[in-house]
Structures are given as C-alpha cells and as structure tokens.
Amino acid sequence: MTFPPFAVAVDLVVFTIRNDELCVLTIKRGEAPYKGRVALPGGFVLPNEDLEAAAQRELAEETGVGASHDTHLEQLATYGAPKRDPRIRTVSVAYLAFAADLPEPVAGTDAASAKWMPVSEALEIKLAFDHSTILKDGLERARAKLEYSTLATAFCPAEFTIADIRNVYELVWGIAIDPRNFHRKVLASVGFVEPTGELVSQGRGRPAQAFRAGPAVQLHPPIARGT
C-alpha cells in the first residue's frame, strides 16, 4: 500500500493574565492559507526536531516569547482531521503553556502581527484552521487542572497573596468565588502554598500575608470548580 505524504506540526495555546483578564497568545497570519486571519502560533516540525523543541522554536520565532521565560509547557492533544490544513495532510500536536507576566509579543517569520487577546474575545471569532477547537480544548484543560493541580501558581509572580490565587481561579473559571471558603481550602491543601513571613499592603485594610509556591504538584484535597 502506498501512503500519501503528510506533515507534522505543532500548535500552541499560551495563557497568561494581563490587565486582570485571562489572555491567549494569537497571531495574524501573514501568508496563505488564511492570510490575514487570527490564529494560534505554531508551524511545521523540522525533520531533525522533536515535538517539544519545535513548540519552543515556533513560540520564539512567531512571537518572540519563549526560551528566556519560565513557561509551563505540556502536550494538550493531537489533531488530524484530513482537511484541517488545505496545503497537505497535517497532523498537529497541540501544546498548552502557562506563565506569569509574559512580555508583549513581537511577530516574526510568517506572522504579520502577534498580540495577547482576551480569551473571551478569541472565543467569539473563528480562528484559522481548527484553532478555535484547540483553544476551547486548551481552556477546558486549564480549568480542569486548577481543580486538582497547583497550576494557579504558574500565573503568579514569585510572591503572591491568597487573593491573587483566587483571582486566577476566578478569571480562568469565569465565576466568582467566596473569599473565606477559598482561603480555607487553599491552606488546607498540603504543599500548595508556603508563607514567606512577609506582609503585602493592598490598599485599605490590613496588609495581607505573602506566600510562595509550595512543593506540591497535585492538590490534596482538590479544589472543586465552583468553590
């Protein structure tokens, strides 16, 4: 049996929090197909590359974000619909990335521009290729991971308050959370956060206790969505 040619690509769903909004990294395509359309960053894997190296390279080449930043990166899913790319049969491995305080992106290679777009806005438009589906899958993965992992600390600076962590949960989940109940659950989850011994002034009221990320990777007990 003769098999038709196909390509392997990587696509990236990169989340950060900017201006008190959950944002996703997007590009405007500078070349066909879908020239001028908004898309997620990504591209073809080179013959001598492994998948994660390709993801890091595409992130840096298309947006200027990547290697010098402490970014959590994990595989999301594989997408291989026969006509997802009109150029050639393409199987794409999507990666999910999270980081705090990422810089403004700078477009390069085949991207005409790059920017952080509020997720709420990105969900309202039809992205190039099947990137709308990839974005929705990435958002649901992020929302689920907040329930059972310490992912929320990846969106925070080195030192933060419980209110900062709660803000991450509210922005990613898209719901309001009871502050006292959430505070109790965070401190009950062993190894989630550790006190620094410092206090942080947050305007009116008493200064808040500062925390850093603890050693845990999983939450025990988990924090259920809607807490």
Image (cartoon, grey):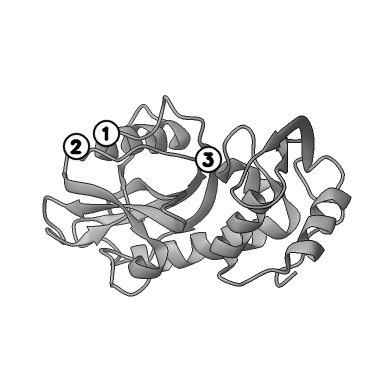
Residue at 73%, 63% (x, y): give it.
179
What's the residue type where badge 3 is placed? Leu
Marked residue nearer the N-terminal end (2 or 1): 1
Residue at 86%, 56% (x, y): give it.
221
Residue at mark 3: 73
Residue at mark 1: 61
Could you give the CA–CA distance between mark 2 and mark 1, rounded to whole angstroms? 6 Å
Residue at 29%, 33% (x, y): give it.
64
Whether residue 160 is situated above or below residue 3 in the rendered picture? above
Q: Is residue 38 left or right of residue 160?
A: left
- Quadrant of the rendered structure where residue 197 is? top right
Q: Where's residue 138, x and y in %?
A: 50, 59
Q: Where's residue 133, x and y in %?
A: 41, 68
- Quadrant of the rendered structure where residue 174 is? bottom right
Of helix, strand and loop, which one carries label 1?
A: helix
Q: Where's residue 212, x and y in %?
A: 70, 34
Q: Is residue 136 left or right of residue 33?
A: right
Q: Residues within 10 Å of mark 2 (few under 14, many from 20)?
A: some
Whether residue 114 is situated above or below residue 180 in the rendered picture? above
Q: Is residue 215 among the parts visible in the rendering?
A: no
The answer to whether the residues at label 3 and label 2 have Cβ atoms under 8 Å apart is no
The answer to whether the residues at label 2 and label 1 have Cβ atoms under 8 Å apart is yes
What's the residue type where badge 1 is placed? Glu
Marked residue nearer the N-terminal end (3 or 2): 3
Residue at 51%, 62% (x, y): give it.
139
| Image quadrant containing the C terminus | bottom right
What's the residue type where badge 2 is placed? Gly
| Image quadrant containing the N terminus | bottom left
Residue at mark 2: 108
Q: Where's residue 100, x and y in %?
A: 50, 41
Of helix, strand and loop, which one carries label 2?
A: loop
Q: Nearer the viewer, residue 155 or 217?
A: 155
